[in-house]
Amino acid sequence: MKRMKWRHILSAEQFNRNSIDYLFDKAKSIKQNPSLYNKILENKVMAKFFYQPSTRTSFSFDIAMKKLGGHVISTENARVFSSVTKGETLEDTILTLTTGLEVDVIVLRYDEMDGAKRASKITTTPIINAGDGAGEHPTQALLDLFTIQEELGRLDNFKIAMIGDIKNSRTVHSLAKLLTLYKNVDIIFVAPPEISLDKEEGQKTVKYLTKHGARFFYSNDLERVLTEVDVVYVTRIQEEYFTDRKAYDKVFGKYILSPKILPADKVPIIMHPLPRKGEITFAVDSLPQAAYFRQVNNGLYVRMALLSLILGKN
Ligand code: NCD
């Protein structure tokens, strides 16, 4: 298979089926035999610069880099713990890390849309978008897609419901875009009207899905939708993007996945990018279809594969 060339990872829009197959094959080989890869990024340095909190994405990138033999330096809460607090721009920060300090890759989580794109305009050092406000989260979408393939055994011919804060969830925006690459995929969005995909931040995704011929629908009947889909992707209501507390309270808790609303005969695969805040009850965790912690594990291998393809000699 042809080697895929990436410099930056900015958006789900940059991938095609071939590049995803190539990446997933790599992730599977690493998962099967990680020790073969434990020195391939020796002497490489990853700078992780996060303007927003993170547990999974942050640790996942750290561990992925370390398991490949590389080094990690990082700043969490960059608006407080870095010179951003003194007023330094994103551009100056990126030039400091690249031209100044010669890091090999930057993993950036920014708090506004297109942060990673801005960074990529001023450097040839690879920039990986680890979330840009309510915009995109392409590496999460790749690990989500990898999980669907592992759990369902296919990426064509299936139905997926995406539930919760569809407007503000960058993971939803990126995953929905990736799904347009596959045949016969129906996406059903289930969200309170205030945070549905056709509102503000979501509109870019609606345009993209329409342009790429995606089959997507809206519903507010969660119980019925659960009987129709193969996969359900639940998201947290993204409190940090609400300016009005009352508006948040109005939509919080509207759709909750619990064993009692799941169909008795065929339970869909249950996914969540995490963290959850009550939208999947703990009682769901013991079902074999609850895939969200396996999703986290897959993320490690998908990120190892990405880093090795971006920085390695393979
Ligand atoms: C998500 C994110 O940060 O966008 N989490 C993640 O990266 N796994 C989802 C969220 O914060 O709800």
Image: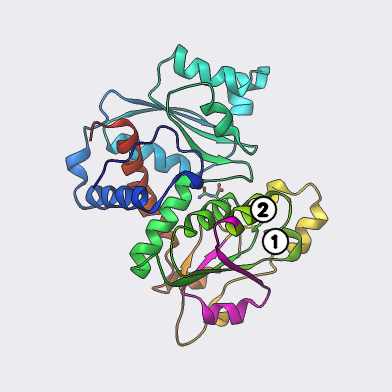
Image coloring type: rainbow
Instruction: Inspect the magenta stretch and tell me whether residue 78 lies in it.
Output: no
Is 61 left, or right, of 70 in this rendering?
Answer: right
Looking at the rendering, which quadrant does residue 35 occupy? Answer: top left
Q: Which residue is mark 2?
A: 202
SS type, badge 2: helix
Q: In this picture, which residue range is highlighted in magenta?
A: 211-234
Instruction: Inspect the magenta stretch and tell me whether residue 224 lies in it.
Output: yes
Q: Are marks 2 and 1 in contact (CB under 8 Å)?
A: yes
Q: Is mark 1 within 8 Å of ligand 1?
A: no
Q: In the image shown, does 167 or 60 lie closer to the viewer?
A: 167
SS type, badge 1: loop
Give the CA separation, mark 2 to mark 1. 8 Å
Instruction: Please indicate, yes or no, whether residue 10 appears anywhere in the rendered image.
Output: yes
Task: Look at 17% across and 41% down and name the residue there.
Answer: 36
Q: Position of residue 221 (x, y in %)?
A: 66, 78
Crowdedness near tag 1: few (<14), some (14–19) or many (≥20) residues, C-alpha within 10 Å: many
2 or 1: tag closer to the N-terminus: 1
State whether residue 72 is above or below residue 89.
Answer: below
Task: Look at 42% across and 65% down and name the residue there.
Answer: 291
State whether residue 83 is above or below residue 166.
Answer: above
Q: Position of residue 29 (x, y in %)?
A: 22, 50
Q: Position of residue 227 (x, y in %)?
A: 53, 82
User: Which quadrant is the C terminus positioned in?
Assistant: top left
Q: Which residue is mark 1?
A: 196
Crowdedness near tag 2: few (<14), some (14–19) or many (≥20) residues, C-alpha within 10 Å: many
The residue at the far bottom in this view is 265
